[in-house]
Image (cartoon, rainbow, N blue to C red):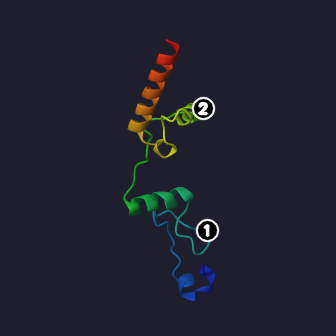
């Protein structure tokens, strides 16, 4: 990565305001583009087309995840797929009911 201070053109073109919220960049490095991490991240999300946060559809804790994987009901690669997680949990519950009912 090149040093931004080594490029004389870049030093002369330093922005005076945050590229996301237009607040002053006074007190920041002369090659700063954003006033904060939040503005940098929000700008990136806007650029890539994702403005809203991604929410989980199903959550399991560590011990439950490990139990589902040990019983062979859940493939570790599928732990973020809500439908496959429900199927694995249902399967494990049926096996438990057969064994102990």
Secondary element under disc 2, as helix, strand or loop, is helix
Residue at (62, 85) in percent of width and height: 6
Q: Position of residue 96 (x, y in %)?
A: 50, 20
Residue 21 in sight? no
**Residue 95 badge:** none
- Say which of marks 1 and 2 sits in front: 2
Place residue 70 in its image quadrant.
Answer: top right
**Residue 63 badge:** 2
Q: Position of residue 39 (x, y in %)?
A: 50, 59
> Looking at the picture, does residue 67 appear above or below residue 79?
above
Place residue 10 in its image quadrant.
Answer: bottom right
Residue at (44, 47) in percent of width and height: 53
Q: Position of residue 75 (x, y in %)?
A: 49, 42
Relative placement, left or right, of 44 versus 37 is left
Which residue position holds label 1? Answer: 28
Between 53 and 82, the one lying in front of the other is 82
Secondary element under disc 1, as helix, strand or loop, is loop
Q: Are marks 1 and 2 in contact (CB under 8 Å)?
A: no
Q: Position of residue 47 (x, y in %)?
A: 40, 63
Label 2 neighbourhood size at 10 Å, few (<14), some (14-19), many (20+)? few
**Gap between marks 1 and 2 measured at Cα:** 46 Å
Residue 32 in sight? yes
> Looking at the picture, does residue 40 appear above or below residue 86?
below
Label 1 neighbourhood size at 10 Å, few (<14), some (14-19), many (20+)? few
Q: How many marks?
A: 2
Residue at (40, 59) in percent of width and height: 46
Between 31 and 60, the one lying in front of the other is 60
């Amino acid at each position: 990565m090149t040093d931004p201070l080594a490029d004389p053109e870049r030093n002369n073109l330093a922005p005076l305001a945050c590229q996301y919220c237009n607040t002053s960049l006074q007190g920041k490095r002369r090659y700063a583009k954003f006033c904060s991490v939040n503005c940098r991240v929000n700008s990136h999300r806007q650029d890539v087309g994702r403005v809203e946060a991604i929410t989980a559809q199903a959550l399991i804790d560590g011990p439950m995840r490990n139990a589902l994987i040990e019983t062979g009901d859940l493939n570790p690669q599928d732990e973020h797929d809500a439908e496959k997680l429900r199927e694995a949990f249902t399967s494990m519950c049926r096996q438990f009911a057969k064994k102990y009912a």
